[in-house]
């Protein structure tokens, strides 16, 4: 009974601390992003409410990347508070080992990771897609910091080759804005250049809106709407234009299969899928790292040094994950190894540190 009651108590304290850290970082990031968007849209007539909504849709995906650090800081805060109030001393005196009062946080972290993968990730991916649409309304063809190269697609039909450059992509590539199209005849000779405000993918064609056509031997021609034949399907366009972060966990297996069938590189999608699968265990590894640096009694001293070492370990783990991610995207490491290596390193580091501290 004592162990069960303490387990519920420790789990509740861990969840409250983690949620408090997550909400605090969320509000801080929303505020900073809102100020930045206001600065970038000072020349437009967008309302402050619309800018705030855009910022609110942009932040969840950023916080998804910071979730392991929220767990790390939340667990450290929880255990340091319990240690400062001597509750850990009482638990040890009652015969509860460090492994026992760490287990509720581990189970809670696994549950939070599963919910983040199954529920939070699809919601954040959808909100990121909406944020892109709202940014297109705010900035128009000027993406306000978007890479000048934009998005490129090459297609070859019976009418010849067409090279399409778009400033921005919405709805995972089926709606493009800020277009420049270079058309070539079947014999490879340059035919015309088309600039359009936006393009919408329809069955068998791109519908170009507000198009301006420029040729070498005739005056410029303006058209409110013009068709551009294409043999690309919606699935192929989504695979080319969508980034792995904007695809939800439940859609990733389908994207991987369709990309493989289309001959498109799938390393990014496979890495994202494996990272989402490993997220519950990564959060549990963060709890073990936090416990390894937070269970020291205050009267023994050296708490500040251990907290800094925990933050440093979390930073090094983040650097390791970025290195493995880059190696995987460059096809130098398998996506499974790239996604699970930081989990194994973090978990084993915390486990060995706890073994040394608790069991000698």
Image (cartoon, helix red, strand yellow):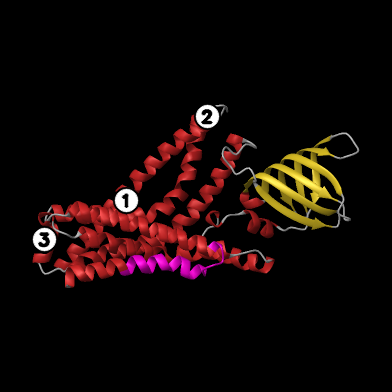
Q: Quadrant of residue 193?
A: top right
Q: In which quarter of the image is residue 230?
A: bottom right
Q: What stretch is highlighted in magenta?
A: 329-348
Reply yes or no: does residue 301 show up in magenta.
no
Residue at which label 2 appears: 47
Q: Predominant secondary structure in magenta?
A: helix
Q: Do the residues labelled 1 and 3 touch (CB within 8 Å)?
A: no
The residue carrying pointer 2 sits among few (fewer than 14), some (14 to 19) or many (20 or more) residues within 10 Å by Cα, namely few
Identify the disc placed on residue 89. Answer: 3
135 w.r.t. 275: above or below = above
Q: Mark 1 points at which residue?
A: 19
Is mark 1 in CB contact (under 8 Å) with mark 2? no
Tell me the element at label 1: helix
Q: Residue visible at 42% across and 50% down?
A: 63
Above or below, 333 against 150 in this view is below
| Quarter of the image with the N terminus in it | bottom left
Residue 35 can be seen, yes or no: yes
């Amino acid at each position: 009974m004592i162990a069960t009651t303490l387990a519920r108590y420790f789990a509740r304290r861990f969840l409250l601390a983690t949620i408090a850290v997550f909400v605090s970082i969320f509000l801080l990031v929303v505020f900073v992003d809102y100020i930045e968007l206001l600065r970038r849209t000072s020349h437009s007539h967008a309302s402050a409410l619309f800018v705030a909504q855009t910022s609110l849709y942009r932040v969840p995906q950023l916080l998804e990347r910071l979730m392991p650090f929220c767990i790390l800081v939340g667990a450290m805060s929880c255990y340091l508070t319990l240690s400062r109030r001597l509750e850990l001393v009482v638990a040890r005196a009652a015969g509860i080992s460090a492994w026992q009062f760490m287990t509720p946080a581990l189970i809670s972290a696994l549950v939070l990771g599963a919910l983040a993968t199954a529920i939070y990730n699809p919601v954040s991916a959808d909100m990121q897609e909406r944020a892109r649409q709202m940014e297109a309304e705010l900035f128009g063809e000027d993406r306000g910091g978007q890479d000048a190269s934009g998005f490129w697609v090459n297609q070859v039909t019976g009418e010849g080759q067409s090279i399409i450059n778009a400033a921005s992509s919405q709805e995972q590539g089926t709606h493009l804005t800020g277009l420049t199209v270079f058309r070539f005849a079947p014999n490879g000779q340059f035919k015309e250049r088309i600039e359009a405000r936006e393009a919408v993918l329809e069955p068998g064609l791109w519908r170009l809106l507000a198009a301006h056509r420029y040729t070498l031997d005739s005056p410029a021609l303006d058209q409110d709407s013009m068709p551009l034949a294409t043999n690309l399907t919606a699935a192929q366009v989504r695979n080319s234009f969508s980034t792995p972060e904007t695809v939800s966990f439940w859609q990733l297996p389908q994207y991987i299969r369709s990309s493989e069938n289309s001959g498109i590189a799938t390393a990014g999608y496979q890495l994202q899928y494996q990272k989402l699968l490993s997220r519950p265990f990564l959060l549990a590894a963060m709890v073990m790292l936090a416990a390894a640096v937070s269970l020291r009694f205050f009267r023994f001293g050296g708490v500040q040094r251990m907290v800094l070492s925990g933050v440093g370990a979390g930073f090094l783990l983040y650097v390791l994950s970025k290195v493995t991610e880059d190696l995987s995207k460059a096809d130098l490491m398998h996506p499974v190894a790239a996604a699970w290596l930081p989990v194994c390193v973090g978990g084993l580091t915390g486990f060995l540190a706890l073994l040394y501290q608790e069991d000698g």
